[in-house]
Every structure is written in C-alpha cells, then in structure tokens.
Amino acid sequence: MSNFILRRLLLLIPIFIGVSILSFLMMHLIPGDPARIMAGQDATYQEIQSIRVEFGLDKSLPVQYVLFMKGVMDGSLKSIKTQRPVLKEIYPRFLNTLELSLVSIVISAFLGLGFGIVAAVKHNSWLDNLVMGFSLFGISMPVFWLGILLIIVFALILGWLPAAGKGGIQHIILPSITLGMATSAIIARMTRASMLQVMNQDFIRTADAFGIPQRKIIYKYTLKNALIPVVTVIGLQFGYMLGGAVLTESVFGWPGLGRFIVDSIFARDYPVVQVGIMLIALTFVLVNLLVDITYAFLDPRIRRR
Amino acid sequence: MNDEVILSVRNLKIHFDTEEGEVKAIENVNYDLRKNETLGIVGETGSGKSVSAYAVMGLIPQPPGRILGGEIIFKEKDLLKVKKDEMRKIRGNEIAMIFQEPMTSLNPVFTIEEQMLDILRAHGFSKKDARLKSIEALEKVKMPDPKLVLKKYPHELSGGMRQRVMIAMALSCEPSLLIADEPTTALDVTVQAQILKLLKRMQEEYNMSVLLITHDLGVVAQNCDSIAVMYAGNIVEYGSAEQIFERGMHPYTKGLLKAIPPLEEKTEKLNVIPGVVPNLIYPPQGCRFHPRCGRATRGKCDVEIPTLEEIKDDPGHKLACFNPYGG
Ligand SMILES: Nc1ncnc2c1ncn2[C@@H]1O[C@H](COP(=O)(O)OP(=O)(O)OP(=O)(O)O)[C@@H](O)[C@H]1O
Ligand code: SF4
Ligand SMILES: [Mg+2]
C-alpha cells in the first residue's frame, strides 16, 4: 500500500510539469500574436513591443517557459491590471473557491450517500421514488436559478441569511447548497445504482446464507464494494466544482478564483488566467490522486497494480 | 445410519413472477433427509435444484418468488413459518450452504479472516474464540498454512482454495445440515475429486447430513446414500443409491444413467437425453417429461400428472411415472 502511494506521488512530478507547460502554452495556442492579444485591440505598436519584451515573447518557447515558471515563483510575473505578483492576486481567491468547494462536496457527499443508501435499501418503495424524483429535480435545476431562488426566499423574504459576500458561516450556506445541489443528486443516484448492483452479487447471497446480520450486510459488505465507483464520482464532481463554481460565485458575489479568472479573461490579464488555470488543474490532479488512494484502500485488487 | 429425519420437505411449490409470465419453477417437491445421510439431488439445468435448496435456507427472493405451499420441517420446526430473525440464526449456524461459484461467492474487498470472523461472531462467538475456530476449520479442510490464508483476499487464492475456504466457513459453526449446491462444477477435474473427498470426510467427522446438488450422476454415485432425481420442478424418482443405480425405473433416470461419463472426464451439462428442458412458464400438460419421453402414452401421460409413490415391493423406492421401465 505505501509502495503504491509512493509510486503515485512520484508520478505527480511529470504530471505537474506537464500541467504547467500546458497552462503556459495556452497563450500560444490562441490564434494570433500573444503580445497583440495581451495589449488589446487599440494598442499602439510601441505598447505591443513593450509587452513583447516584458513577457519575453521575443525569446524561444523553452526559454519563455522557464522564465514564466521563474516569474510565478519569485513573484516577478505580475498581473497586467494591478501590477501585483500574480500568485499574490490569485492565492486568496483560490482559497475562497477551495473553501466553497470543500464545504459543498462534504455536504453533497453526506447527503448523496445517505439518500442513495436509503433509496437502495428501500428499493422500489415510496421513499426510493421520492429520493429519485428529488434527485432528478436537483440535477436539472440551473445553478443561477436555484441560487436566485434561495436568495429570494432565505435572504429577502425570511431574512435569515445574507444574500451575498463572504464573511462568517452564514455566508457560505446558500452558495454551498447551490453549488452542491446537483452534485448531491448525482452522488445519490450513483450510490443507489451501485448499492443495488452489489446487492445482487453472489457474495452478498453468501453473507446472507451465513446469517450475517442485515445491517452488517448493508453497511459493511455492500457499502464498501459500492463505494468504489461513488468515490470516483465524488472526486470528479469536486474537480468540476473547482472549475465550475463561476456561476455560483457570480450569483452570490463570492470572491473566488473562477469569477476572478473570468474577469481576467475579459480584462486580457493573461498571466492571471494562465496561473489561475494552472492552479485549478494542479488541484484537480491532487484530488485525482486522493481518489486513487481511496480506491486502493477500498479495493485490494488495485493495490497490486 | 440413524433413522432420525432431520429435514423433511413436503409438497413444496414455488413460482416466480417475471415479465414474461409466471415461472412454475417448483411444482411438487418431497424428500426426507436423515441424520448423517447424504442425499443427492440430480437433474438437468433449470430443473429447480437450486431453488429448492434456497427455499430451505430461506433465501428465495420475494418478490419475484412466491412460495405457494408446502412445508420444510427442520428439527421439528417449519422453516417456512419461522421469523426472519430466527431464520438468520439458523442460517450459517445449524444449516450451512456452499455455492456453485467459488470465484464470486466470497467478498472481494475483505480478507478471509474478516469474513470468517463475521460469520462466527454473528452466531455468538467471542472474537478470540472465533479466531481459534476459523484456524481450526481451515486446518480441517487441509488448508496449508491457515494463519497465512486468513490474511489473504479472495483474489489471491485459486478456485479450489476458495472452495475450501467456503467449506471451512460452512463447517466453522458445526452445522447439522450442509447444503452443497454444485460445489465442484466450476472447478477442474483433479480439484473436483479432492473437494468431493473432503466433503465426504467432513460429513463423517462432523456427523452432518448433506444435501448434495449436482447435475452429474457420477458425482452422486460416489458420495450419496440416497438420491432424488428432479425434472422440471418435480422429484420424479427417489430412493437409495442402490435402488436408483440398480433398479432405476423412471425414463428420465434411465436417460441420466446412460449419460454418466467416465469418472476422470470433466462433464459439461448433460445433453444426452434428446430434447430440451421445457419452458417453465408454459410447462407441458400432464407429465412434464412427456415431450421427451420414449415411453409416453397418448391420452394418459399428456393429460394426467403422475404422483410420487412408493413402489410396492421395493420399500423406500419412490417413482412418479405411468409406464416405468420394468414396471
Ligand atoms: N429469481 C428468479 N426469478 C425468476 N426465475 C427464477 C429465479 N430463480 C430461479 N428461477 C427459475 O427457476 C427455475 C429453476 O432454477 P434453478 O436455478 O433452481 O435450476 P437448477 O436446477 O439449479 O439449474 P442449474 O443446474 O443451472 O443450477 C429456472 O427456470 C429459473 O429460471
Ligand atoms: S409418466 Fe409417461 S411421460 Fe412421464 S415419464 Fe412416465 S412414461 Fe414418460
Ligand atoms: Mg443451480
């Protein structure tokens, strides 16, 4: 097991480098001259030229990459708009997004697993139908619509919770529900399907035949097997939240990275965009690693690979 | 052998509701199993062997299954009337079952130890006793290095070893009845013979009664005291091994006897009797075997249902047929 983790950690190094190269290349994959794009439509020749020099765009690609990475680390890569080091601009916002996504995924995982298990155990009952119906509702509801609805009810009408901004716990409740609604519905469905599938396996029949108590069959024998695909979904959904929190962040005025990246795209603040995306991608990779380790923890057959 | 009957199945009838219609899987099954006796239930695929065994274990899924009648008397209790919780205590403890598919019958994400201990703990053993018991059971089934095996996951064991583990699990609570549903079908020939020998030895050592289900009369020949021949949901002939092998009279039994392959060869499902097992949603009228039977008489076999009755001058030998061989 520790061997497995070590190997996966070593594998992170080339992946990190790959991700940083891709984020760096993004500027060059957009058609056109990066300096011109960064400078904006009505920039003068001098302005374009000075950007070209400032960002080393007159040098070869490998040199540019090294300069880019060096700039990220030592803070010499600056936001075009604010002229502050890019990492300094991004980091607090990244933490905000991480906080929102973490709270959302934890709530979603609990709700999704709980309802999924109940639906599977009470398969075909009214409870099952209720959970399935509700989850369909949760999946199909547009984020901005749900967010605005929650604001109207809980902030404007009832006045229980703030409508926007970041502060105490009360500020994160509505955005995390909004962000997590679809995810918890997806996790619930996945859990239910996976539990039902495992319940039909021979080894569950064996457990039954040996008089293992019902609770133990559900929460130990079935659940551990059923969790394997669910963990993958949770990991994917978390990655999705990191990148996809933009809408929620916009609706609730949450000062997160997603919204910041979008603003920076419009502001042509490309260093910010590059580093922001790099950070999201790296987090995604880390989450994936966490999923793989959980996987190996749940399923001994994977540990050997 | 002791004459005390420990399991008595009477007029068992089980149907399944499916999309296509009502599967009349078990129509009329009757047999007795005495203490220390091994009863073989033989029949082609789909004849209802597993379903009748699951019924004894209380493992018929309902729905789609419906138990329409009958009694399963085990130690003076009708298992069909026993409450769920009580049945759970009987399962694994007094009646144990081993299954056809050793590859998929063990939980892939828990060690053998975890699974064996859970069984024993479900039946009241302390953790420490449970551990000792499982090691003892693994030793009994001639598992090399039981302590090491306990630490293994199922995928780290071969098919034959998994089946040994299953047998050890079944024996660990010292049941008085062991149901073995085609325990060797999925294994290769040499392992098959070993497992059968092991079962036989365990039956003697633990004083168990064994219900041995198979589609292979050859397996039954070496291991069973009595034999019930099953066809399409009915027991069609029943008797001691001698009665069936020497004086088998039912046309279906005769067909099976002719199909016994040489011992060493691995057998596929029997296909020597012409025709196929009937669709149990629309089973044939009268004797369910009549479309495939060479001795069927029109107006009788396709109209009336033969009942299982004792043959006059052969006590214990029962038959359900209008025109038996030698009759
Ligand atoms: N859960 C179920 N739902 C519907 N039909 C079922 C179910 N279980 C069993 N049956 C039907 O009952 C009949 C008897 O099946 P059973 O498994 O007892 O046969 P078998 O004699 O054990 O055959 P095999 O040698 O293949 O194991 C079959 O027609 C089968 O399709
Ligand atoms: S009752 Fe008739 S059809 Fe059935 S086995 Fe006997 S002879 Fe054949
Ligand atoms: Mg079967």
Image (cartoon, coloured by chain):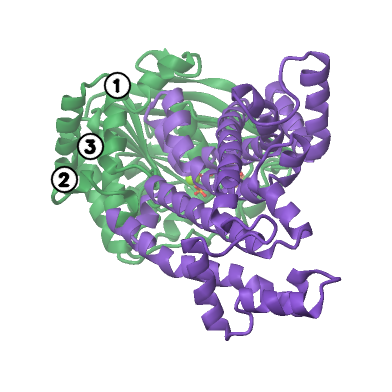
Q: Earlier in the sequence, mark 2 or mark 1?
A: 1
| Residue B138, percent from left and from top | 19, 42
Q: Amino acid at mark 1?
A: His
Q: In this figure, which residue is indicated by the disc labeled 1?
A: B123
Color used for chain B?
A: green
Instruction: Identify the secondary structure beneath mark 2.
Output: helix
Q: Give the image quadrant in which the ligand numbered 1 is located.
A: top right
Amino acid marked by disc 2: Pro
Q: A44 left or right of B195?
A: right
- Mark linked to residue B203: 3
Task: Give the mark, 3 or 1, whose residue is nearer the N terminus.
Answer: 1
**Gap in Å between the C-alphas at discs 2 and 1?**
21 Å
Check the residue under mark 1 and report the chain it is in: B
Q: Could you confirm whether marks 3 and 2 are on the same chain?
A: yes
Q: Residue at x 54, y 76 (%)?
A: A65
Residue B146's label in the rendered image is 2
Asked if marks 2 and 1 touch (Cβ < 8 Å), the reply is no
Residue type at the position of mark 3: Gln
| Display colour for chain A | purple
Mark 3 vs 1: CB contact within 8 A: no
